[in-house]
Amino acid sequence: MIFPYDITAYNIDVICGHISHKTGTPFHLVKQKKQISYLDCYLQSPDIAANTLIIENSYIEKNYTENYSEYYSRCFHPYSKTCSRIHFFNLPNEWSSEKLEQLLNDRDGGLLSSEGYSELCDGYIGFVVIRPIPNTFLDKICLKIYERLSRPKKNAVIKRKYDVSLFGMPLSIETVAFQEQDKVLSACATSALWSFTHATNHRMEKDIPSPGTITKLAKPSNQGHDRQFPNSGLSSYMIRRFINEAGLEPEQVSLKESMNYNSDLLKEYSYSFISSKIPLICGISVYEESTDADGRVVYQYKGDHAISILGYSLNEELDEVSDINLTAHSIDKIYAHDDRIGPFTRFIFKDSQPVTTSDGQDIKKYLVTEIDNSASSEILNFKKEVIVPNILILGVYHKIRINYSAIKSTAVAFNRMLNEFFQANNYDSIFNEIGFITDTSTWNWDISLYEVNDFKKEIIQSGLKNKAKYLTAHWPKYIWSIEVEDEDKKPLFSLCFDATDIPQGKIFLDVLIFNQKTATMFQAFSEHCEDMVSKSIIGMQSNIDTNFYLWGIINYMADVEPASYSNILDEQYGEVRIPRYFKDDEIRHDSLYFTDSRFSLYEETQIKLDESVQYLWLINEEGWLIIGEEKLIKGTGSKIGHVTLNKGRPGRIAGELKYQDECWIINGKSGRYSGNYSSENLTKYVSNAVEKRFKVYLKGHCFQAHQEIGEAG
Amino acid sequence: MARDFGVEKEEYKKALEEIRKNKPPESYWNGVANLIDQESKRAAQSVKEQRVDDELMHRCFSL
C-alpha cells in the first residue's frame, strides 16, 4: 500500500514521476507538456520560489468526482476515482517526513500554535490536483499570485480566498482556481468559464459547478443535435447561455477590426471591469509560427480559443489617443487563465511589429505570451504564437443595466463640451488665471464600475471636503464613475452615474468636486448649462438618447428639475429629524402624553394668542406651524415639551414664543428638534418661520426673532 | 436655476463675475448643438461597431 504522503525538496522531475505513475502518462510526455513547463517556471520565479513539496497520494476532488460519476465511471477502462494533490511551500528550513510526523503527533494539542505550523502557513504557495487520467491530468490548481501583481495602482488582479486542509491543518491561499480541459467533459471554453465562475465570487466555492455541469448547462448547440461528450468546444452563444444559467446577465462586445482587433476596447473593458472584480471571457484566434515554402516566417491559423482575463498591469506612459486620456490605455499586459498554458499567463500588447499569416494577410496588432523561463528554459517547448482577440463576454450582476459604452461616450462628449465652453469668449484664460488648467489633453480619465460600499470607501480615503453629504447619501448598489485627474494625478472631479437605472432613466447622480478651483469651473459651467437649456436651438430629441448621458449632466448642472414642496420645506425649515430624546414624564402607562392645548396652523387664522401665556412652537413634516401652551404635565412637576406638541413624531425647526415689550419674541430653543441644526441654519430657519409662518398665519400680532435664536444641544 | 457649488474665495468669485459679464454670442450655441448631435451619432456608431455579428456569435472556441 502506498504511503499516504511524501515530502521532499521541490524538484520538477519528482513531480513528473508522480504524475506519470498516477495517470499512466509516459514520463517524457509529462515533462514535455506545456503546462508542466509553465508551472515549473511559475513556481521557480523569484516571486514564488517554491522549495518544498508535499504530495497527498489520495485526495477526493469535487470536480473530478462529479466528472467521474458523469463519464469516467462508465468507461470500459477502470479509471480511478481518487486524485492526488501536490502542495508547494517556500520554507526557511528543510522539512522531512519525520519532522512533519512529529508536528502531526503533537499530544499537547499545540499543533496550531506551533512554530512548525506557522512556518507552513507563512510559506504556503498553493496546490495542484492531479486527476488519474492520461495526458490531460491537471485538475484544480490554486497558486499564490505573483507579488508584482499585488502592487495597487499599477496592477489589479481578481482573487478570492481558498481554505485548504492539509492533514487537518488549516491553510489558505488567495488566488483564482485554474484547471486544464480534460477534452472530454470540457474544452477550453468550459475551463475558462470554470475559472470565470470562481473569479466572479458571487457563489460559495462548494456551489460552483464542475466543468461537466458547465458544459451541460451551456448546451444545447446546433438545436441539440451536437454530441455533448466528448465536448468539442463552446460557441459565444453557448458561453452566454451558461452565464445566464449561472445567474448573471451576459454581455458581449466585438473586438474585431478586419484582421486586427480594437486593442483600446480590450484595455478599457479589462480596466473598468477587473478593477470592479468582474472577470471577462475573451475569445481569441491563435496563429502559430511556421515557415512557408520559401522559408519565410509566417503565422499559421491554429484555431479559436477562450481565456478568462483576471488582471492587468499599467505602464507609466499613456498611449497616444485621439479623444481622452483614459488610464485604461496605459495597460501594457493582461493576465489570464489560459488552459493551454497555465494560471495568470501574461499577455503583452504588441502593435509595432506586423506579422504575416500563411495566407498573406498582415496582422498589425496582436498579443504575445511572456513566460518567466529563467529557471528551466531547457524544457520549454513553446512554439511562438501571436494572438488576436475577437470577442469579450462578461457576466454581470443583473442590476448592472447601464453598459460601459454609454459611459465612455458620455466622457468623450463631456470632454468636447468642456473644451467648447473653455474656448467660448476666452474663458480658458480666466480659469488659467486662477490656476485651473483647462488643457484637457493633460487630464487623465478613469472609468470604473463600483459597488456602492467600495465607492464610499474610496470617498472616506479621499480628500473630498464635504464627505458626510456623499457618505450619507442614499445611492444605488452599483455606480459608474468617471474620475478625472490633472497631469500631477491630483483628483479634479468625479462624475457619478446610476449603473442600475433603465437606459432612458435619470442616470446622472452627482459630481464630486475635489478643490475650489474645480468648483469655480463647475459653477461657471452650470450657469452655462442653464443658458443652454433655455435656448430653443437645442432640440429635446437628445434628451432621450440612450447611447450617452450628456444631457443628464447638462440638466443636473442647470438644475432643471422643479424642486418638490418637501425640498422647499427642507431648505426653509430644516430637514425632518426625529426628536433627540423623550422625558420620563412624557411617557404615561407606556403611552406618550399628548397636550390638548395646541393648535395646528396651515393658513391665515383669526386665533388670538394669550399674552399672559408662554408657548412652544414647531414646524412639522408637512410644514404646518404647531403652537401649544407650555404648561405642566398633569400630576408631574414637568412642563410639556416639543415632543408632546408633535405626538413624538419627526419634525423640523422648533422653539419658544414669549410676549415681551408688546411683541412676540420667537427663539429656536428646543433640545429635541433644534439641536440637530448648525447655529447658522438655526438662525435661517427661525427667521423663515417668523416671516413665512407666524406673520402670515397670525396677522394682527407683532412677531420678531430673538437675537439669541437658540442653542444647539 | 444653476447649481450652487459653494465658491467662497473672493478671487474665484471675481472670475465668475467676469465670465457672467461675457456671455457667448448666439452663434456659439449652434456650435454646441452641432457638437451634441455629432457626439450622439458617434455614440450610436460605437454601439453598432461593438455589436457581435453572426459569424462571431457561432464561432466555436475549442483549441
Image (tube, coloured by chain):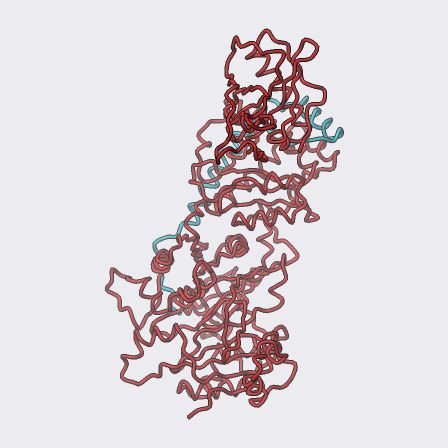
Chain colours: A red, B cyan
Which quadrant holds residue A574? top right
* Residue A458: image location, x then y, percent: 61, 49
Name the quarter where the N terminus of chain A is drawn: bottom left
Residue A270 falls left or right of residue A711:
left
Depth check, front residue: A414 or A572: A572
Q: Furthest residue to the top? A: A700
Tell me the quarter of the picture where residue A188 sits: bottom left
Count all numbered tags in the image, as a single digit.
0
Whether A408 is drawn above or below A110: the answer is above
User: Looking at the image, which is closer to me, A554 or A318?
Assistant: A554
The foreground one among A75 and A711 is A711
Depicted A405 relative to depicted A173: above or below: above
Q: Is residue A305 visible?
A: no
* Residue A402 seen anywhere in this rendered image of the structure: yes
Q: Is residue A126 above or below residue A205?
A: below
- Residue A337, x across and y down, in percent: 48, 67
Q: Where A549 falls versus A647 (above or below)?
A: below
Residue A237 x %, y %: 34, 57
Residue farthest toward the bottom in the current orientation of the protein: A1
Q: Position of residue A578 (x, y in %)?
A: 55, 34
Name the residue: 59% across, 35% down. Answer: A580
Left or right, A699 with reference to B37: right
